Amino acid sequence: MILGLGKSLLTVDAVGLLFGAVMADMSGSHMYNPRWPPHAKFHNAQTISLSVLLGVSTLVYTWRRPSSPQLKREFMAVTAFTGSIYWLAGLAAILFPGTMGLDPEFGGPGFPQAPIFAGFAVCGMLGSWVGWVSA
């Protein structure tokens, strides 16, 4: 039962990674924003790709069948990283000079992503911890 909770939380996290950046960033406020220069769009595409790759990795290590409890704990350590690093980086991004969570033309300043990023990071870390202790 508890293992199912951990896998469920990690799957929710992975789905957020697989679809969240694509949905948010392939939009008029980001990739299709004519005011964004090509290099900014390059980094946006890099971020989208990173999120999808981390989501796939999180799913693989969440659902891969380990051959031992030790290997299960190692898988959970990997998912703690793959499932939370994108979200933690998103939370840290606001600390860099000149950054905002929203451009003024879209209602900024503000950081509406903060609770979403924090929630998914918690899903990843808590799901990994539950998987670790149940191994």
Image (spheres, rainbow, N blue to C red):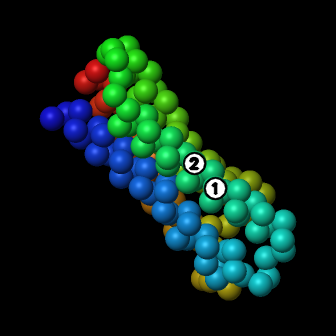
How far from the left and from the top, in percent, is residue 129? 35, 30
Residue 21: x %, y % from top left: 56, 63
Q: Amino acid at mark 1?
A: Ser
Q: Is residue 73 above or below residue 6?
A: above
Q: Position of residue 116 (x, y in %)?
A: 45, 60
Name the residue tied to disc 2. Answer: 53
Decide: marks 1, 2 in contact (CB < 8 A)? yes
Residue 101, placed above or below residue 127: below
- Tell me where residue 127 sits by quadrant: top left
> 115 and 75: which one is in front?
75
Q: Relative to 62, is 55 on the left or the right?
A: right
Quadrant housing residue 100: bottom right
Quarter of the image that includes the C terminus: top left
Q: Residue at x 55, y 70 (%)?
A: 24
The residue closer to the viewer here, 104 or 59, is 59
| Residue bearing mark 1 | 49
Which mark, residue 134?
none
Q: Residue 64 at what x, y percent from top left?
A: 38, 32
Q: 41 or 125: nearer the eye?
A: 41
Instruction: For marks 1 and 2, give the CA distance.
Output: 6 Å
Q: Residue at horizontal 52%, vertical 70%?
A: 23
Crowdedness near tag 2: few (<14), some (14–19) or many (≥20) residues, C-alpha within 10 Å: some
